[in-house]
Amino acid sequence: MQTDIDPRSLIGRKAYDRDGHKIGTVDEVYLDDATGVPEWAAVRTGLFSRDAFVPLAPSTYRNETLHVPYERGLIKGAPDFGVGRHLSPDQEIQLYHHYQLALPEPAAPETPPRPADRDFGHVAGRDEPGATP
């Protein structure tokens, strides 16, 4: 999905499946914990029905509507985790499997700089030029 879209602008927008059938209205947007990038949308599938989670990465946002590249039945059959709560890593994995998406690569741990890369500054020693006795 376009990364320059403000996730708040998706709330309340209509969502359509790959065949152009309306699946509902975007109720909430979930951001990736590590990157802050919008990753999932909860789409209210009807007046008395539940929210279905849809992946935003393969989806497109055009003409102020969300277009999800999956069939409506698959979307409505997505695992139901309720809305308003944080998605756990296990729940996200279930969603990735449901939509047959490749799991994202785990974030590489930051490698601390090697001693030669660190900027320790320099303090003149007693025997070095510029040192005060």
Image: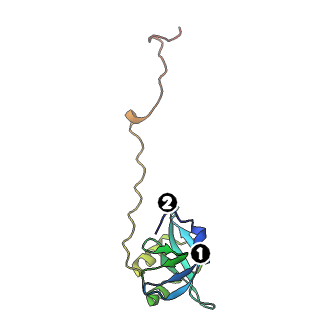
**Label 1 is placed on what type of residue?**
Glu
Say which residue appears at 40% left-offset and 55% top-offset.
108
Q: Quadrant of residue 19?
A: bottom left
Q: Residues within 10 Å of mark 1 (few under 14, many from 20)?
A: some
**Label 2 is placed on what type of residue?**
Thr
Q: How many marks?
A: 2
Residue 42, compared with residue 49, is above or below; it is above
Residue 14, compared with residue 40, is above or below; it is below
Q: Which residue has dot 1 on it?
A: 28
Q: Quadrant of residue 81?
A: bottom right
Give the percent coordinates (x, y) of residue 121.
48, 27
Residue 115, compared with residue 21, is above or below; it is above
Give the percent coordinates (x, y) of residue 102.
36, 72
The answer to which of 117 and 65 lies nearer the viewer is: 65
C-alpha distance separating marks 2 and 1 = 18 Å
Badge 1 marks a residue whose secondary structure is strand
The answer to which of 34 and 133 lies nearer the viewer is: 34
Q: Is residue 94 left or right of residue 10?
A: left
Say which residue appears at 43% left-offset and 50% top-offset.
110
Q: Which mark is residue 35?
A: 2
Q: Which residue is outermost to the front? A: 63
Q: Is residue 29 left or right of residue 112?
A: right
Q: Which of disc 1 and disc 2 is earlier in sequence?
A: 1
